[in-house]
Image: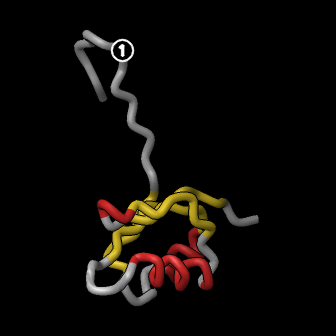
Amino acid sequence: MATVALWLITISSDQPIDDIATRLTAEGLTIREVLKEIGCITGTADDATAQRLKKVKGVVDIAPDMQIDLGPPEADQTW
């Protein structure tokens, strides 16, 4: 069974983000958020689907989501 992960997709600004989101959904992405202000879409998909999404017109980059722990306030280390 394929592992589903959260992906961050950077899109180009030369076409409406909603149109790109529709194409990504058609290719198998389950959209979580459309962040119009920063030109990014987040969603879940397996690795094979993520590879297909790279070929969707309007996609500039696709990267897996990474957990970041900033630690407690006043901590010496944040990463």
Q: Is residue 35 left or right of residue 29?
A: left
Where 21 sits versus 5, above or below?
below
- The residue sitting at the right extreme is 1
Quarter of the view holding residue 64 = bottom left
The residue identified by callout 1 is 72
Q: Is residue 63 left or right of residue 73?
A: right
Q: Position of residue 65 (x, y in %)?
A: 45, 52
Quarter of the view holding residue 69 = top left
Check disc 1 and report its element: helix, strand or loop.
Answer: loop
Q: Amino acid at mark 1?
A: Pro
Residue at horizontal 55 percent and vertical 81 percent from the top: 22
Query: Which residue occupies the foreground of this view, 66 or 31?
Result: 31
Q: Position of residue 8 (x, y in %)?
A: 43, 61
Residue at horizontal 63 percent and vertical 67 percent from the top: 30
Query: Which residue occupies the foreground of this view, 37 or 57?
Result: 37
Dot 1 crowding, Cα within 10 Å, few <14, some 14–19, many 20+:
few
Where 31 sits versus 26, above or below?
above
Q: Is residue 43 left or right of residue 3?
A: left
Residue at horizontal 43 percent and vertical 87 percent from the top: 55
The C terminus lies in which quarter of the figure? top left
Q: Position of residue 4 (x, y in %)?
A: 64, 60
Image color mode: secondary structure
Q: How many marks?
A: 1
The N terminus lies in which quarter of the figure? bottom right
Residue at horizontal 40 percent and vertical 76 percent from the top: 17
- The residue sitting at the top extreme is 74
Quarter of the view holding residue 6 = bottom right
